Image (cartoon, rainbow, N blue to C red):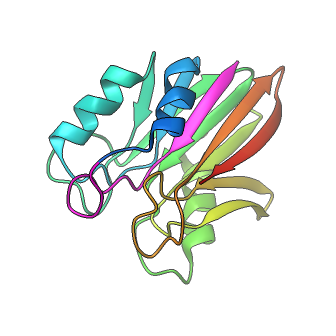
Amino acid sequence: MELALFGDSHIPSREPHIPDPFVSEIRTADHVIHTGDFDSKGALTDAQDLAPELTAVHGNMDPQIGLPTVATVECGGVEFVVTHGTGSRGGWTQRVADAVTEHATGDIAVGVAGHTHEITDTTHDGVRILNPGSVTGANPADRPTMMTVTAEDGDLEVTVHEL
């Protein structure tokens, strides 16, 4: 199963749109995960229109757009626990690992979060954590980034995309 992971869009307050090369990655994925901070209901609607299937969470810069703060989805034998990671930079990995521990129901779980605008693929307290950065390169990011993930039989292959 092919997944596209992106977040921290901040459309329209910081950037006007998702870069075209990333739109293509999102459209061709089997499932799409957004880590929050759409910034507007229109940006959420655009993501819903692009994604074949979308799992998304509420970010600290989102208006009330009807998204949960934590969501889970199983793809390719992996349970993805998605949260924005809101809070100070210090403690971000612990907050995400704690969300996985609290919400995961399967044996193989990965945390997916945003908020820092920094590409991250790390393990904390035995929990793998992915952050696709900012799809638009919104400040404080220095470039637009996202991830694609191939999940098969509980194994992950992660690819970072940057412009």
Q: Main secondary structure of the magenta part?
A: loop
Relative to 77, residue 116 above or below: below
In the depicted structure, whether residue 74 falls above or below residue 97: above
Image spot of residue 36 (x, y percent): 37, 50
At a point 20% along the width and 61% down the height, the residue shown is: 13
Span highlighted in magenta in the image: 1-16
| Magenta-colored stretch includes residue 6 | yes
Residue 15 shows up from this direction: yes
Q: Is residue 154 magenta?
A: no
Compared across the picture, whether 57 is left or right of 125 comes to: left
Q: Residue at x 73, y 20 (%)?
A: 76
| Location of residue 95 with respect to 148 vertically, above or below | below
| Residue 66 in sight from this viewpoint | no
Q: Quadrant of the C terminus?
A: bottom right
| Residue 155 picture location, percent across and down | 85, 31
Rendered-image quadrant of the N terminus: top right
Image location of residue 104, percent across then percent down: 61, 39
- Residue placed at 56% from the left, 40% from the top? 5
Q: Residue at x 40, y 73 (%)?
A: 139
Where is residue 153, by image quadrant? Answer: top right
Picture coordinates of residue 108, whole percent (x, y): 76, 35
Quarter of the figure with residue 145: bottom right
Total marks drawn? 0
Going by the image, does 15 lie left or right of 83?
Answer: left
